[in-house]
Image (cartoon, helix red, strand yellow):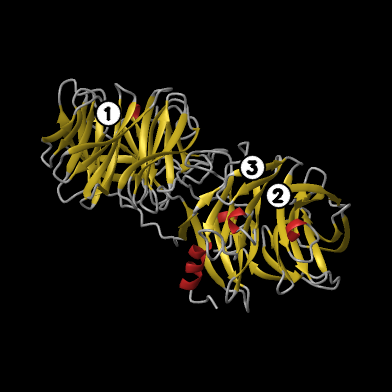
């Protein structure tokens, strides 16, 4: 049957805070529809058109399980069970076989079944994921940029759970929990835009919500299509489907309509599905130079094939991909969820490098001490410690010639630490400051002595000279200067006597580190396409042939490496991604970092240690990640500017 259908304007994309004015427009869309598969008591719900040279359809059925139909809509294969939900990703190699990955919910057992559909049309069960505490309602798949595939599930109490299920590097099913968050009540459906990394959840009586699908993101939502009176959708929303180029398709059975929203083009249309009484679900695919869909008519218990004409796909999304590396180790998480871990430092045992220590701040509790493998060794709960730094120098009069300082926001002071003869960190006391809201901190060591730089959120920097730590701490403020706006991270280069400081929303500055009152700061890097605010942690790495400044670009969850020579060239920009094989997640929302070139067991060129603002795989409180510096050095050398 062929219909010439008038279409109506759906609605503009809506922010969560309110609705924009609606505009009406008309357009003509040609729609071919014909029954695809009908059988008494089929009781299906979801059908999908699979990609390939000849069309194949995969359908769910409560009575007949998963049904695979050929291009003439004749059954050619089935997998027994009671299924309604369905999600697929094609071009997946499983056990060396090209396959389509299929995920569905077994209604009898409340279990997710993961299957491979081979090119010879056979199904193979690859894994099961049981749920014991709540009824599963829907699921969808997400192919991540590196090729790994994760699974979103939503249950009857509104909780969304994300699991890694496919390891692209090893080409096998590997189920690992990532994170959970509160989604929407009475969820109807979900879908993911792989290219734009967006998750869509249907709340039946409200509309369609959009979340960031990246495992390292926060579950912040935006309302993109709403039912009346908030938007133009008539009746309850039951389904959402996303095509490969990012078009969002929404089903409202009471009005017999399929709505399309194209974020890139601004197109919003409503297509009336004449001939279907209650189109509960519609899965849309770009196939044979047009949008094609499989719709399930709940009233008549049958499937329909739809050919949607006169709607063009969106143009492919173009954006620069940031290189990724992976972490090699991680510390135990801090004690509490929330924004807690902040800044690391490392103490290198010159005699026995394996006994080196990682120091990390927990700004809700104090200073945490970890072994090199990440095991928590000490917890010094002395207040809201924010940033920490360390110096090891023969002129420092303490065991192991070590001085450690940290900014303590509980009393706007500088907390001072040292190692005892047993390599335990001990709190020696505090240096009072007149700052209102102490924030960042870094240390500097030169022939003139040991110094600490601290800053305030109002932009002020203060420099203190520490001349003694025992029997009492003796320190004196020797300089004060300011940046135009809020700073935090800083790092002093002891070899060149330069201090590098970050202005969170503006860029990076350089100033003389010696307490010269006439020294002036100059900006050496600005916020832009690569360095995204906030500018957070930074540290100087002294390599064999060159020195680099490593900076946390928090705004895009990446790290930038600058060459410390003329014009400060950008040598590398990278993210830290998850490694399913080691069970270590990626890194995001990084506050502080540190680096060392000292050779350590397994790390002959040293390490980079970063705070991880979202600790996943599984979801836990924040922690610190350890990265082999050789991975960073390889990226620097690829730039051709390693010096």
Residue 74 versus residue 515 in the image, above or below: above
Q: CA distance from mark 2 to mark 3?
A: 32 Å
Q: Is residue 485 visible?
A: no
Q: CA distance from mark 3 to mark 1?
A: 42 Å
Secondary structure of the residue carrying tag 1 is loop
Tell which of 613 and 630 is nearer to you: 630
Give neighbour class at mark 2: few <14, some 14-19, many 20+ (Cα, 10 Å): few
Q: Which mark is residue 529?
A: none
Q: Position of residue 331 (x, y in %)?
A: 57, 46
The quarter of the picture where the N terminus appears is: top left
Q: Mark 1 sits on what residue?
A: 45
Q: Which mark is residue 339?
A: 3
Q: Is residue 599 visible?
A: yes
The quarter of the displayed image where residue 336 is located: top right
Give neighbour class at mark 1: few <14, some 14-19, many 20+ (Cα, 10 Å): many
Whether tag 3 and tag 1 are in contact, CB under 8 A, the answer is no
Q: Which mark is residue 422?
A: 2
Q: Is residue 464 left or right of residue 561?
A: right
Q: Residue at x 19, y 49 (%)?
A: 52
Of tags 2 and 1, the one toward the viewer is 2
């Amino acid at each position: 049957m062929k219909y010439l259908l008038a279409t109506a304007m759906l609605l503009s994309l809506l922010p969560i805070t309110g609705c924009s004015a609606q505009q009406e427009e008309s357009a003509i869309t040609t729609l071919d529809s014909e029954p695809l598969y009908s059988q008494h008591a089929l009781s299906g719900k979801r059908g999908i058109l699979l990609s390939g040279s000849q069309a194949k359809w995969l359908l769910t059925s409560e009575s007949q399980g998963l049904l695979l139909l050929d291009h003439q809509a004749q059954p050619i294969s089935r997998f027994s069970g009671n299924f309604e939900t369905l999600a697929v990703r094609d071009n997946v190699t499983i056990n060396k076989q090209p396959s389509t990955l299929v995920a569905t919910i077994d209604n009898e057992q409340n279990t997710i079944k993961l299957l491979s559909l081979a090119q010879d049309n056979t199904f193979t069960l690859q894994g099961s994921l049981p749920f014991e505490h709540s009824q599963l309602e829907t699921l969808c798949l997400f192919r991540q940029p590196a090729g790994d595939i994760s699974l979103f599930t939503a249950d009857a109490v509104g909780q969304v759970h994300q699991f890694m299920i496919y390891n692209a590097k090893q080409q096998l099913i590997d189920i690992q929990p990532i994170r959970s968050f509160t989604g929407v009540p009475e969820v109807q459906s979900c879908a993911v835009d792989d290219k734009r990394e967006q998750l869509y959840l249907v709340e039946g009586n409200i509309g369609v919500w959009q979340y960031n699908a990246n495992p390292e993101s926060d579950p912040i939502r935006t309302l993109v299509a709403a039912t009346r009176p908030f938007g133009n959708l008539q009746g309850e929303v039951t389904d959402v489907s996303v095509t490969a180029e990012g078009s969002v398709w929404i089903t409202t059975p009471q009005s017999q309509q399929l709505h399309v929203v194209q974020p890139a083009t601004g197109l919003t249309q409503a297509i009336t599905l004449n001939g279907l009484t209650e189109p509960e679900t519609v899965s849309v695919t770009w196939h044979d130079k047009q949008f094609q869909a499989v719709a399930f008519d709940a009233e008549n218990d049958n499937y329909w094939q739809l050919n949607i004409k006169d709607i063009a796909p969106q143009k492919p999304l173009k954006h620069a991909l940031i290189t990724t590396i992976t972490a090699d180790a991680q510390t135990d998480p801090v004690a509490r969820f929330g924004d807690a871990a902040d800044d690391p430092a490392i103490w290198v045992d010159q005699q026995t490098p394996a006994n080196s220590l990682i120091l990390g701040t927990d700004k809700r509790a104090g200073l945490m001490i970890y072994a090199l493998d990440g095991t928590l060794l000490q917890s010094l709960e002395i207040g809201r410690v924010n940033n920490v730094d360390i110096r090891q120098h023969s002129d420092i009069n303490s065991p192991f010639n070590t001085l450690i300082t940290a900014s303590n926001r509980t009393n706007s002071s500088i907390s001072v630490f040292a190692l005892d003869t047993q390599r335990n960190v001990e709190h020696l006391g505090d240096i009072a400051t007149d700052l209102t809201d102490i924030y960042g901190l870094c240390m500097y060591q030169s022939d003139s002595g040991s110094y600490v730089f601290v800053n305030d959120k109002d932009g002020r920097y203060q420099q203190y000279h520490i001349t003694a730590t025992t029997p009492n701490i003796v320190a004196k403020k020797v300089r004060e200067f300011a940046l135009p706006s809020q700073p935090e991270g800083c790092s002093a280069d002891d070899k060149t006597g330069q201090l590098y400081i970050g202005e969170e929303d503006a860029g990076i500055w350089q100033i003389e580190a010696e307490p010269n009152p006439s020294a002036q700061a100059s900006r050496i890097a600005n916020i832009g396409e690569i360095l995204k605010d906030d500018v957070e942690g930074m540290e100087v790495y002294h390599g064999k042939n060159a020195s680099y400044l490593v900076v946390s670009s928090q705004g895009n969850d990446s790290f930038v490496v600058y060459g410390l020579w003329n014009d400060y060239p950008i040598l590398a920009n990278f993210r830290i991604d998850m490694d399913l094989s080691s069970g270590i997640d990626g890194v995001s929302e990084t506050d502080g970092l540190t680096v060392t070139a000292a050779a350590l067991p397994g790390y002959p060129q040293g390490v980079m240690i970063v705070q991880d603002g979202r600790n996943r795989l599984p979801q836990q409180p924040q922690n610190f990640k350890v990265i082999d510096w050789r991975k960073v050095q390889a990226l620097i050398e690829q730039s051709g500017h390693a010096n």
